[in-house]
Image: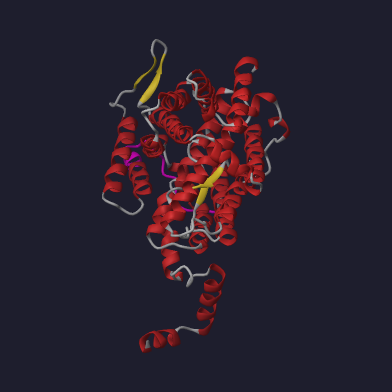
Amino acid sequence: MESIQQEQSAIPNSTQSNRGLLDQFFKLREHKTSVKTELIAGLTTFVTMGYIIFVNPSIMADAGIDHGAAFVATCIGAALACFLMGLYANWPVGLAPGMGLNAFFTYTVVGEMGYSWEVALGAVFISGVIFTILSIWKIREWLLNSIPMSMRYAMTAGVGLFLGLIGLKTAGVVVDNQATLLSMGTFTDPAVMLSAVCFWMIIALTYHNVFGAVIISILVVTFAGWGLGLVEYNGIMSMPPSIAPTLMALDISGAFEVGMISVILAFLFVNMFDTAGTLMGVATRAKLIREDGYIENMSKALKADSSSSVFGTLFGCPPVTSYVESASGVAAGGRTGLTAVTVGILFLCAMFLAPLAGMIPAYATGGALVYVAMLMMTGLKEIDWDDVTNTIPAIITVVMMPLTFSIANGIAMGFVTYTALKLCCGKHKDVSLSIYVLTVIFMAKFMFL
């Protein structure tokens, strides 16, 4: 006790006062943590999920968005979302543009369906507003509970498989073939080999619990490409690029057309179920669940997550969502919103790394995409494989997302198949009212759009 008092007396009064304010605001003592622990946890979370500052701008650039503006938008959108989660909900969760949904945004909505990226941002804005409304009212709980677990896991896994195909295509491992649609690329291409090296390195470093495995692998492969003359060195740090090309550029009115209904629903459902699963997992690890099952500030966390997508579109971000990588920060001791605020500050600091982000080649991000995709597919083990009326719709959902190159089509075909099989097999009681409504909407999409 005397040594602790001596240490406290040695700390300047201003520092003690600041720590006292942080303790009171974030309830550090109540959660049995400290400022130092929360800062370390925030750094851990950021390093684990920081690959998004390199990957997301590359994906968004393929939609026609200025790479520099997309980079700054990623950092600002993620930072604001982290601040909202930390200051409002007091949860140790980092947020950023969602993997999978950004690929759907670029390669399906813009690339396949032909909409402009401004209209696609408008669709994200609308889905975010709907998600926020659902988070305020009881409709969210009703909708979440009415969607069968098999379909929830299937949607996440399907997005993962879709993202994996994008990663393999970006890396050059899978290429277009007029005769067979797809075929394998050539590994004599240095870019393809470096992509494979990036993927293998991420797996190996992750297995050995190396801090920042994904970011380290991306950077190592990037500098290897520079050594081979495949990457042009542009520097490491500079003032952030202008965000003017994407600031307030969304086209909300353009998203109000019948053809965008399935797109908005896809953004909504994937974001909603991914968020629910992530927040539940983090709450369990952070011991935010009481013995009676009550989850502290869960409602605020959902509102913070859902509204983040709305704010993110104003800067040019695809759907912003909670990251499961936040569990790494929780494992490092993070228990309060100070962890999330720390992540947000680090995202703002990352804006000065624009030259480095511009150097990251597609084959480096491709290896990372495949790794993230495989993590998303692990939920398949939770599906009840003994009931074909559950497994067949789940498999169709997973498989049809990459085969149709559309998350929306995969979800639609999965729900229609689920309802049809349940009715044909005499299990109509398993079909909720919300499933019937969604099935009718998706059938109308296939027949009339």
- Residue 187 horizontal/vertical position (percent): 29, 26
Q: Total marks drawn?
A: 0
Q: Position of residue 42 (x, y in %)?
A: 45, 60
Q: Position of residue 337 (x, y in %)?
A: 52, 61
Residue in the picture at 41% in, 24% down: 388
Q: Quadrant of residue 198?
A: top left
86 and 153: which is toward the camera: 153
Which segment did they paint magenta? 224-239
Please state, as top left, top right, bottom left or bottom right, where the C terminus lies in the image. Answer: top right
- Identify whether 167 is placed above or below 128: above
- For the N terminus, the image quarter is bottom left
Residue 422 lies in the magenta-colored region: no
Tell me if residue 32 comes above or below residue 205 in the rendering.
Answer: below
Q: Nearer the viewer, residue 392 or 53?
A: 392
Mark yes or no: residue 144 visible: yes
Residue at 36% over, 87% down? 3
- Near-viewer residue (107 or 304): 304
Q: Could you tell me what secondary structure mostly forms the magenta stretch? A: loop
Relative to residue 366, is residue 244 depicted above or below?
below
Between residue 297 and residue 222, name the one nearer to us: 297
- Residue furthest to the top: 179
Residue 80 can be seen in this image: no
